[in-house]
Image (spheres, rainbow, N blue to C red):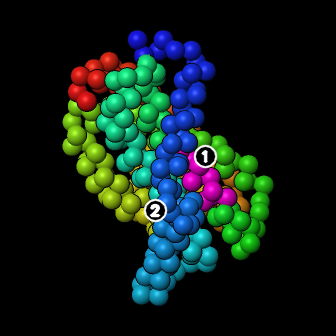
Amino acid sequence: MTAAAPTHDHLYILRNLVAKDFKVRYRNMSLGILWSLVNPLVMMGVLSFVFTVLFPSLDRKHYPLFVLLGLVPYNFFSLSWMTGTGSVAANANLIKRVPFWRELLPVSVVLGNVVHYVIQIALLLVAVVWFVGFNVQWVWIPAIFALQIVFVCGLALLTSSLDVYHRDVRYVVESATIVLFWLCPVFYGVDQIQADLVWIYTLNPISAVIYLLRQICLRGLPPPATTMLKLAGVSFGTLFVGAWVYGRLKKDFADYL
């Protein structure tokens, strides 16, 4: 039985899985955690150059901040989903030897990426304060991030369990993150989407997160209640489906790993 150990033992395992992921990622790197900031800054520079110099049709005030408010949450989503998908197969020996909640594997990967996410967001918000200013609507930001984490945990649970049986799943996920980069309003705004397609974007949790962050940080506006409700519904719905599928499949993990 994988649930035989006391709860505090599972929490201990979770802490160690998160710590191990963090240490392994930055082992023998001179800049350490600062590397988590390099990719979004490089992408911000490239996208800002392309869409404000080469193709200035997307030029708008504070465009670098506008891009970062899309890139940072999207990068967290894509990295967590891809690494979470392979988390069960990558820990085959642990599954076969140690009794613990199998759900901790994909969840620990997501939480490990949350550490980097928080650092990136903190520095991004400092830049927002410097160039735009602080406003009282920032109180909504933790709730938005929490809903995004719930959504990504649900996706990771779903695809990591399927990946045990069909290793093609990880490649499907990798391709999906590339497609979604262009379908999410990372370097363009929701206001540039056809009016009859906007409702689809509000059902995409990552698009909703990006839209809400820009509303709060750049415009100082409260998040629309309907968008928040849709984000909460899709996020918890995904978590429920992911946990249900994972729970049905996990009993045979050891036989397929």
Q: Measured from the top left, where is residue 142 in percent x and y? A: 66, 46
Residue depicted at 28% across the width and 45% down the height: 170
Give, as a single range, the part of the protein colored magenta. Answer: 110-122
Q: On the rendered image, what quadrant is the N terminus found in?
A: top left
Q: Residue farthest to the front?
A: 28
Q: Measured from the top left, where is residue 206 in percent x and y? A: 47, 51
Residue depicted at 51% across the width and 42% down the height: 20
| Count of numbered labels shown in the rendering | 2
Q: Which residue is mark 2?
A: 185
Number of residues whose C-alpha sits closer than 10 Å to that of mark 2, classed few (under 14), some (14–19) or many (20 or more): many
Please tell me which residue lies in front, 255 or 246: 255
Q: Measured from the top left, where is residue 15 in percent x and y? A: 57, 35
Q: Measured from the top left, where is residue 187 in percent x and y? A: 47, 69
Quadrant of residue 131 in the image?
Answer: bottom right
Viewed as shown, does residue 170 lie left or right of 194? left
Please tell me which residue lies in front, 39 or 65: 39
Q: Which residue is mark 1?
A: 144
Q: Amino acid at mark 2?
A: Pro
Majority SS type along the magenta span: helix
Please, is residue 55 above or below residue 134 in the view? below
Q: Is 177 inside the magenta-drawn segment?
A: no
Q: Amino acid at mark 1?
A: Ile
Q: In what element is the residue under mark 2?
A: loop
Identify the mark nearer the N-term, 1 or 2. Answer: 1
Q: On the rendered image, what quadrant is the C terminus found in?
A: top left
Please tell me which residue lies in front, 104 or 169: 104
Residue depicted at 50% across the width and 32% down the height: 236
Q: Is 118 inside the magenta-drawn segment?
A: yes
Please, is residue 161 above or below residue 56 in the view? above
